[in-house]
Structure formats: C-alpha cells, structure tokens
Amino acid sequence: MKMSLMLVVIMGLAGMESVAQEYEIGQKNKEFTVKELTVRVGDKMVFTNQDPFFHNIYSLSEKQSFDLGSYPKGNQRSVVAEKPGTLKVECAIHPNMQMIIHVEE
C-alpha cells in the first residue's frame, strides 16, 4: 500500500511539470514590456494594450504565424505556443515594436 501511494505522488509531481503557464506581455509607450521571453509549447501569451491607442500584434514566423487584430487600450488578446522555435513578434501599426519569443518543448 505504501508503494502505491508513493507511485501516485510521483506521478502527480511528474504531471505538474506539464501544466501550461500564462505570460502577460504589455504594450506601453509603443513598446513591449518584455523584449525577449522563453516559454514552452502549450503556454499562453496574453498581450495587454496599456497605451491610449490601438495595437495590432502579429508574427509571420515560420514556426507559428498569428495576427491578433487591432485592439484598444485596456483590451487583451492571447495566443498559445504551438511548436518549438523562435517567434519574432511585431505590431502592424508601430513598426519599431518588436520582441522575440523562444518556444521550447
């Protein structure tokens, strides 16, 4: 019986490693609040607009492309990391807004 309990505890701890994380990335003063980020496949990146004007966050990266559309101050959009690789993320409205997201297994 002790062996069974120990096995359940070990399996539970192993499962905890695979829980997806959520990362908030703000847009303030026409910049991302995070310039570079490392996440795992399945993690969620939430982009929150803190500026008084619209942003349109996107990536045309080979590993994963997305376009979150235009959204105003106080709104947020999110994307989930789908596969390993490096994503260059930009704002379609403000071309100097750029960041890098490294996605690991």
Image (cartoon, rainbow, N blue to C red):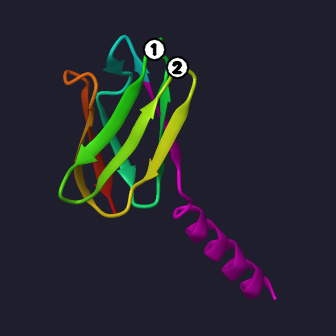
Sequence-wise first label, 2 or 1 = 1
Residue bearing the label numbered 2: 73
Residue lying at 52% horizontally and 20% vertically, measured from the top left:
73
61 shown above or below 48: below
Q: 38 and 5: which one is in front?
A: 38
Which residues are the magenta region?
A: 1-26
Dividing the picture into quarters, in which one does residue 40 lie?
Answer: bottom left
Q: Foreground: 81 or 58?
A: 58
**Which residue is tagged 1?**
51
- Queried whether the magenta region covers residue 36, the answer comes back as no
Q: Are marks 2 and 1 in contact (CB under 8 Å)?
A: yes
Lateral position of residue 61 relative to residue 46, left or right? left
| Quarter of the image with the C terminus in it | bottom left
- Residue 10, above or below 98: below
* Residue at the image position 38 percent from the left and 49 percent from the top: 39
Q: Amino acid at mark 2?
A: Lys
Query: Label 1 sits on what residue type?
Result: Asp
Q: Is residue 12 magenta?
A: yes
Which type of secondary structure does the marked residue at label 1 adopt?
loop
Q: Position of residue 57 (x, y in %)?
A: 35, 36
Residue 1: x %, y % from top left: 82, 89
Element type at mark 2: loop
